Image: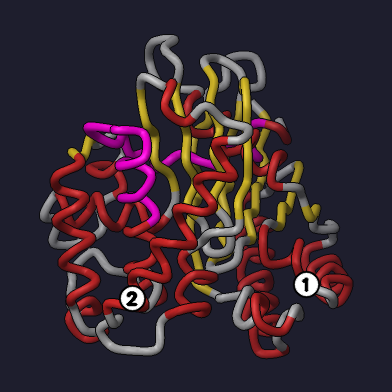
Amino acid sequence: MTRVAAIDCGTNSIRLLVADADPDTGEIVDLDRRMIIVRLGQGVDRTGRLAPDALERTFAACREYAAVIKEHGAEKVRFVATSASRDAENRDEFVRGVLDILGVEPEVISGDQEAEFSFTGATMELPGHEERLVVDIGGGSTEFVIGREHVEAARSVDIGCVRLTERHVRSDPPAAEEIAAIRADIEAALDLAEETVPLRGAGTLVGLAGSVTTVAGIALGLHAYDSEAIHRARIPYERVAEIARMLQNATHDERAAIPVMHPGRVDVIVAGALVLLAIMERIGAREVVVSEHDILDGIAFSVA
């Protein structure tokens, strides 16, 4: 076993996994897994730059994570940055700050690399060898990966819960025309994804990241977020559609009162749920298998 630390810095959140990993068996034993909503991608779609307060929130989280990594004595650390930092003109400022705090340079990876990590993390423990479509709905982008034991095709498209919310939502709850604009962007992005990934060919749809796990928590009627209950849950299409309708008709305060809702996800969950629903409708999926294991686990495995 090798003790490793994996950090995934996305558009909405920054997450840490410290684990003992066996590169021969693929086994990963969690020691510490946590998330902080930092909204690094705040305004990037509009300005093309990382905002100073967004950078400071992210650096504060990095300082917290540095202490956790030191406490556990991780031998190797890998920091992966995704959509927001790919798009930003001032990403060098972000890279320097992370390097100063953690001693490792963040790897600003491509959407295809992000897809590879997500697929590995999500599927390495699932039984069977049927073809699976893994969708990772992030803050700035969504990754589509299809394969059995290995990736056969992958595509990253620029639809994510933060990007879509900032682009279209001005009302509370969102107005009908705002929902329609979000749906139009999603459908156009799905057309792009289908140019590379045969979305309708997979036997199993596996959903990753906070929008999916939040919908799952609501579907399961949980009184508090419970990753063990959510991991590997199977949520039928009808339930996802019902929850998406409920969320888009709810006010900010009503969404905030949902027991499993993270405070940092309240204003973006509508767009995230709509992305999941549109994917299920496009491919005719009867259910989504929810995985709590995702890009973080893929990063940790790559380090080991």
Spot occupied by residue 109 in the image (x, y as percentages of width and height):
76, 49
Residue located beneath label 2 in the image: 266
Q: Name the residue under label 1.
A: 88
Please indicate whether residue 92 sits to the left or right of residue 183 in the image: right
| 168 drawn magenta | no
Residue 287, compared with residue 16, is above or below; it is: above
Pick the residue in front: 105 or 181.
181
Q: Position of residue 241 (x, y in %)?
A: 19, 52
Amino acid type for the residue under numbered disc 1:
Ala
How was the colour assigned to the protein in this rendering? secondary structure
Closest to the observer: 200 or 124?
A: 200
For this view, does 109 lie left or right of residue 275? Answer: right
Q: Which of marks 2 and 1 is in front?
A: 1
Q: Give the range drawn in magenta.
A: 275-301
What's the residue at 30%, 42% (across, down)? 281
Q: Which residue is drawn at 22% across and 69% down?
A: 247
Density class for disc 2 (Cα within 10 Å; few <14, some 14-19, many ≥20) is some
Tell me which residue sits at (52%, 78%) in the image.
167
- Note whether residue 296 is visible: no
